[in-house]
Image (cartoon, rainbow, N blue to C red):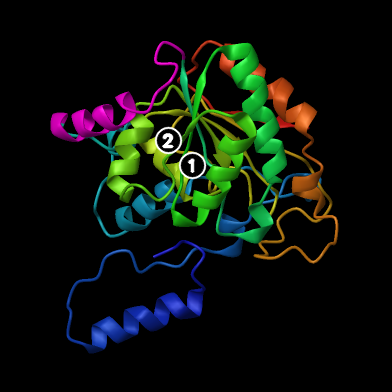
Amino acid sequence: MISERPRKAVLRDRFFFRSCGIPKLFGFHPFSDEELYPVDVDGRPAMTEHEAVRKLRRLADDGIEFLPNDLRIPLLDFSQSELEQIGRWLESRRQNPTGPLIAIAPGCKTPTNEWPLENFIQLGSRMMAEENCEIIVVGGNAEREMGDRMIAAWGCGINSAGEFSVRESGALLSKCDYYLGLDTGTTHLAAVAGTRCFAIYGERNNQGHWFPLGAGHTVLFHAVKCAGCRLQDCPLPDHPCMTEISLESAWLNLKAFLGQDYDDSRTQVVSV
């Protein structure tokens, strides 16, 4: 269960399964607010541990030991046939097979995590002009129309949104050189498939909780007074934690990300 599940709900679940006659339960331990939402000396939401680590730690409380290798990257392994299938699909569509293949996921399910589609279009145009890359739009059916609009604006590119299952999408992302997206499931899928992520995040959650798993990524954010709100919909008309991440600041940091040496010891967190 998600670590933020309320204490009363966790205890209720434990009581229910005990009442069903199940003698041994694993992971039914609530987290305190201090663990879930730590703050720094200035009262701002502080860096916290990853949700995946919390889940493993919850099991460790019941004696199921976990080791650092349990969260190795890539976390997903794909068969040769799976990779060949994706390879054939890409080969039939690539127009610049010698350049880097960069995935862009422009959509997300949570409204507070959204960033303007026009900004993604502009970033894609600049990357193709300066990095000699090819761009593939990734995501689910909800991103299909977005991908069509992006490719129409660029005059080139590949739209894979809605084409594949989750596992097939993971295999596709493993073949990409880089990934650009938001705080959403596709970002996590790219990370566990072993692809370096440039992620644009808001401040609704504590940093680190929902970052891409692993290291070598860059997370871009804009500090706001209302950080840590944990709201699905922003009540502020200008939604500053996302709209204040400008196209220019994103582009400058994206260029640095594409040009930097791979550092497998950390994720770079950049405030703009």
Badge 1 element: helix
Number of marks: 2
Q: Which residues are magenta?
A: 80-99
Asked whether, in this view, residue 241 is left or right of residue 60, the answer is: right
Q: Which mark is residue 53?
A: none
Quadrant of image for the N terminus: bottom left
Based on the picture, tell me whether residue 157 belongs to the magenta stretch: no
Against 19, is 269 above or below? above
**Residue 239 visible within the image:** yes
Residue at 72% over, 29% down:
250
> Relative to residue 37, is residue 86 drawn left or right?
left
Q: Is residue 241 left or right of residue 105?
A: right
Residue to which mark 2 is pinned: 191
Position in image of residue 13 (x %, y %): 36, 80
Residue 187 - label: 1
Look at the image and tell me whether residue 220 can be seen: no
